[in-house]
Image (cartoon, rainbow, N blue to C red):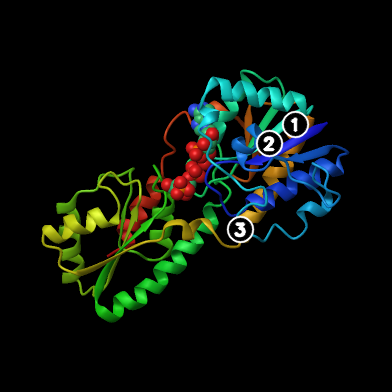
């Protein structure tokens, strides 16, 4: 078989480990692996990864020593043309032209929407791997990149706590998560923050002010508030303004961690998840499967139809929301 792999949407640490697993699993089983560069844009422009001999196919050595590196050697992109029927049809023609039998897109919900659209015009097999720091896909407990993004954010918040303590200030730290509070909630608990503002729970300025007064009365001298960029009140800067206008009892500072969270060497948890899911995606293709994401639930590898991965908002665990409230006292 000729199996193609691409990375699409926001990059996530661990994408390289996933590409490596796909290449090694595919070649070991006697198949050819084609690396498509720059996601769906690269597919439409017929851009392929060239191996050491300059041929448009990946070799065992093409993926040497990449599992520990952030970013993706295949590069990634967002592609306007792929939203259109004509773009999807042209992509299908290109896949037929290069006699590709199966495609493994690594990305988030947008990438999987694209895969479903492509399947209308192409009868090759498609098995996706969940690569996004947001952890916003249903059907897998964690996505590749989430653990590393949380690790990076916790490291940053730990450092900010030092200066917050020294000056007796409050920091509003904005973390990524376009529509999801996963990174914010996990970061808040792991970094012993006092408050998390996430899209899944109401963010009420008066309630936060009340909480801050209570914390102060209990002797708290510094406060860390983690704000998901997708929170309904806007980001950390908007929230800071609202808090200051409503009598915030602490001096405040704001930091948006931004794309910092997308970079860096993936933590072992992400490397392991990426390796397992990449290998499983190849094995699923060889078993004749299609139209699904390779995911992991409670340690078991599972296949989940693409449509189910984005059918609803992935809820954050209520137990963790409660835990944060209990611990921030
Ligand atoms: N509804 C859709 N139909 C077709 N292609 C889509 C659709 N949604 C997203 N895509 C393609 O997938 C790419 C990546 O999606 P995006 O939402 O940016 O990232 P992610 O996959 O990380 O969620 C988009 O740039 C576009 O090319
Ligand atoms: O690369 P950009 O365009 O700045 O995108 C930022 C967005 O990408 C993410 O980092 C990851 O989102 P996706 O993986 O779903 O693309 C979001 O948390 C963030 O809102």
Q: Which of 74 and 270 is in front in this view?
A: 74
Label 2 element class: strand
Label 1 element class: helix
**Residue 113 visible in the snapshot:** no
Circles 3 and 1, Cβ within 8 Å, touching? The answer is no
Q: Name the residue under label 2.
A: 104
Q: Residue furthest right?
A: 30
For residue 3, what is the image quadrant?
top right
Judge from the rendering whether residue 139 lies leftward or rightward of residue 92; answer left or right: left
Quote the CA–CA distance across marks 2 and 1: 9 Å
Question: From what the image shows, is residue 306 above or below residue 50?
Answer: above
In which quadrant will I find the N terminus? top right
Query: Residue 156: image x %, image y %?
Result: 43, 68
Q: How crowded is mark 3: few (under 14 residues within 10 Å), some or many (20 or more)?
A: many
Q: Which residue is drawn at 45% across and 65% down?
A: 154
Label 3 element class: loop
Q: Name the residue under label 1.
A: 285
């Amino acid at each position: 078989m000729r199996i193609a792999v691409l990375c699409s949407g926001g990059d996530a640490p661990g994408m390289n480990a996933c590409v490596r697993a796909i290449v090694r699993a595919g070649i070991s089983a006697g198949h050819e692996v084609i690396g498509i560069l720059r996601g769906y844009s690269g597919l439409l422009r017929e851009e392929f990864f060239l191996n050491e001999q300059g041929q448009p196919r990946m070799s065992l050595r093409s993926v040497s020593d990449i599992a520990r590196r952030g970013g993706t050697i295949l590069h990634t992109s967002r592609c306007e043309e792929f939203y259109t029927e004509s773009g999807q049809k042209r992509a299908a023609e290109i896949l037929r032209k290069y006699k590709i039998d199966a495609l493994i897109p690594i990305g988030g919900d947008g990438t999987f929407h694209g895969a479903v659209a492509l399947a209308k015009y192409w009868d090759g097999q498609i098995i996706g791997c969940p690569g996004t720091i947001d952890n916003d896909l249903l059907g897998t407990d964690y996505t590749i990149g989430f653990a590393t993004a949380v690790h990076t954010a916790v490291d940053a918040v730990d450092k900010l706590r030092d200066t917050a303590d020294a000056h007796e200030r409050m920091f509003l730290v904005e973390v990524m998560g376009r529509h999801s509070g996963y990174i914010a909630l996990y970061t808040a608990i792991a970094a012993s923050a006092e408050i998390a503002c996430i899209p899944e729970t109401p963010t009420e300025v008066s309630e936060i002010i009340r909480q801050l007064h209570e914390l102060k009365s209990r002797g708290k001298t510094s406060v860390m508030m983690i704000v998901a960029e997708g929170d309904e009140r806007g980001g950390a800067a908007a929230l800071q303004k609202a808090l200051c206008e409503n009598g915030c009892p602490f001096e405040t500072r704001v930091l948006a961690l931004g794309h910092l969270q997308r970079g860096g060497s993936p933590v072992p948890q992400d490397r392991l998840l990426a390796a397992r899911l990449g290998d499983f995606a190849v094995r699923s293709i060889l078993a004749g499967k299609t139209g699904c994401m390779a995911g992991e639930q409670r340690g078991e590898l599972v296949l989940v139809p693409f449509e189910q991965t984005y059918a609803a908002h992935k809820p954050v665990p209520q137990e963790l929301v409660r835990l944060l409230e209990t611990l921030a006292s």
